[in-house]
Structure formats: C-alpha cells, structure tokens
Image (spheres, helix red, strand yellow):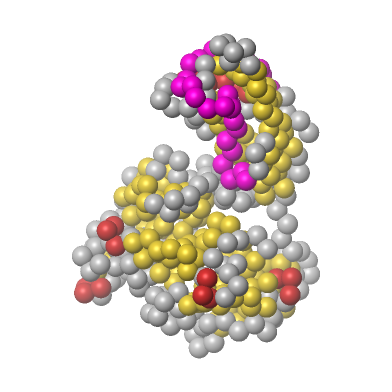
Amino acid sequence: MTLLLAAALLSLAVPAGAADLLAWRVTGAETPGRAVCQDGAARCDRDGTADGACTFGMALCLDGAASVRVRGAGAAALTQALAALAPPATCTAEVPVRVRAGRRARASAAARDPASGRTERRRLRLGCVRQHAARAVIVTTDFETGLLATVGVRPPHRVAHPATPIHSDAVVRVAGERVYVVNRFLGDNLQVLDPAHGLATLLQCSTGPGSNPHDVAVLAPDKAYVTRYDAKELWVVDPSAASCAGFLRATVDLSPWGDADGLPEMDQTALVGDRLFVSLERLDRTRRFAPAGRSRLVVLDTASDAVVGVVELTGANAFGDSSSLAREPGSGKLVVNEAGDIQRTGDGGLERVDPFTLTAEGFFFVTESDLGGNI
C-alpha cells in the first residue's frame, strides 16, 4: 500500500557546489532510493521492537539554492524539517516514518536550482518485512557443561538438541542468517553457527586469553562488536572471516571511561541506527567488585568506530541479565539495569535512556525497593 500524505513547496538557500541537488538519507539503508527493514531490526527500525511495523528514520540532504517539493510518506514532517534547515547544515533532522509490516510506502522529492533552471527528482521506496521466527535457540548449563537446544515457537513447540558443543558459560544471539554463541568466562571465544545446517560451527575464534567476553552486537555479516569484561579494549571482529587469521578487525580502548583499576567492565550492548551503546559497570576489583561511582553508556559511531558520546547513568553497576540492552516498546528508549552494590538492596533500579538525544532520565522508574530485592 502506498502512503500519500501532504505535499509542500518552499524555498531555501544552502551551500552550493555538489552536482546533486538533493538525496535521501535513511538510517540503515544500503541501497540508494530503497530501504527494506525487518520489523524489530535495530539497524533500521528506530523503536527496535517487533511490533507489527517498521519506524524508518528519514532525512533529505540538499546542495545548492533550491525549491523543494516533497510528496508521499513523511511529507508533512519533512516539510517542517526543511523549513528549519539553516546553514551550515545541509541535511534535515531525521523524521520518523512508520510502515506496517508486509506493506510498502513511497516518497518523492523534487528540487529546482533557480540559477540554472535544472530540476532533480529523487524517489524513495520503503518496505517493512515481517519477522519470521520458526525456532528459538537456547543455551543451557549445569555449570560444568553447556548444551544447545531449539524450541519451535508455534505449537506443539518441539524441542531439539543440536550436537554442536558449546562452553558451560555461554549466551546466544541471533542476527540475520547466523547464530552467535559468546563463550564467556574461561571460554574466551565467539562461535558462529549455521542454522541451515543443524547449527554447525562455521567459525570459532578466541577473543583473547582471559578476556571473558560478555556480548556481541552484529552490525553486518562481516562486522560485529564483542565486549570483553576483563579487558580494556572492545573488539571489532569479522564473523564471516574464512579463518581466525582475519577475525580481528580493530580494537577500541574504553579504559578512559573506566575507574582507577583500569578496567571499565564492559558488559551489554545495543545497536540503534548507526550507533553502538556499550554499558560500563565500573567496579573496583580491589574492593570485591564494589561500584566505583556511577556507571556509563559509551556511544560509538559504527562507521568510524570512534566514541562519540558518553551517558552518565543515575545508578552504579549497570549489570544486565545477559540479554543485551533492552529497548522499551513504543518509545524505543534503552532500559538499563543498574544493580548498585550487590551486597546491598535498595540502591538499584531500572532507568530509561534516550538513544537519540543521549540522555538518561535521571531516576529509576522501577526501584529495587519496589521489587523487594536486588535487580
């Protein structure tokens, strides 16, 4: 279904010089003029939840004095964003456009250069794909050995036990057409599995001796981020590498945002558009892992892998349940678990963080006192 909204005509001046008068920019899009997203995919769905629709982040970038006409999906919001555009900026603020799962939307923009009389038109197609999940992948442990299991998500919920061995302290992530197992304390490796072939291991590479990896955030088939709890550097890796020789792509030192012992205790992650969020617990290992002040979220730009922001949280010890940083349905905000001192009760809670403005709410919307115990 095509969404036809308002159209508008306005004039504005922006710096000249480039050949193209205008271009669409859509978060997570890889093909010019076309963006397809799976419902709930953090790379391209702004709210990060499988809620029956994809929320695209759209912007228009201009070059040259131009009259711009916008039609279709998001036209009214983009018109307002164009009116607010002022030099030296050349791209509008990102506006949200929601497309129902299984549906399509279209937008178009036309720009005219008064100096030359030249007119350019750019069309954009948006598509939202329903989330298809036939099986859930589960890791189990008796703290001596680890096992994989799969469970059908529809009745009768058949259970299977793939033969692929995993470590006794493991967490699992699913991204694209691959399953990723983070083998944590004393395992110290990332394992890539192929669900099309019985979850057979395609690649298993070390994350460094004694590194204690805690999470993996997969940006693309050939790029992922691994948090290493007992190390200073976040690893940027290639899970599609032919061998472990090509596994490590780069490292990012997060120790400047740690505490005095030099280790930031990096833990859980979340990908939101072109940003990676990494929770830092910041614990003092000389005092039995007591909190060394407030925890942080470090924000990386996934294009450059540079740290572009740091969010100070209200509480300490941003210790999660190993299921990555959660996104709140509806708002798309991150929900951060801040346990505080695990030897005490009443100093922790859950806090929301806006991943677009990079601000924490400054209070717990649920406290340990509300819940009656440690989070």
Q: Give the image location of residue 248, x and y in percent.
A: 47, 69
Taking the view exactly as shown, the residue that stands out farthest to the bottom is 144
Seen in the picture, residue 166 relative to 350 is either above or below; the reply is below
Left or right? Give the position of 137 relative to 47: right
Image-quadrant location for residue 121: top right
For the residue pair 200 and 33, the one nearer the viewer reads as 33
Q: Which residues are magenta?
A: 5-30
Taking the spot 72% from the left edge, 47% from the top edge, the residue there is 129
Seen in the picture, residue 169 relative to 284 is either above or below; the reply is below
- Residue 183 lies in magenta, yes or no? no
Taking the spot 49% from the left edge, 21% from the top edge, the residue there is 16
Q: Give the image location of residue 360, x and y in percent.
A: 37, 45
Taking the spot 43% from the left edge, 54% from the top edge, the residue there is 305
Q: Give the image location of residue 168, x and y in percent.
A: 51, 83
- Residue 18 lies in magenta, yes or no? yes
Check the picture and name the quadrant holding the C terminus: bottom left
Residue 352 visible? The answer is no
For the residue pair 107 and 354, the one nearer the viewer reads as 107
Q: Give the image location of residue 268, x and y in percent.
A: 44, 62
Examine the residues drawn in magenta and state their main secondary structure: loop
Residue 203 visible? The answer is yes
Taking the spot 61% from the left edge, 19% from the top edge, the residue there is 111
For the residue pair 273 and 149, the one nearer the viewer reads as 273
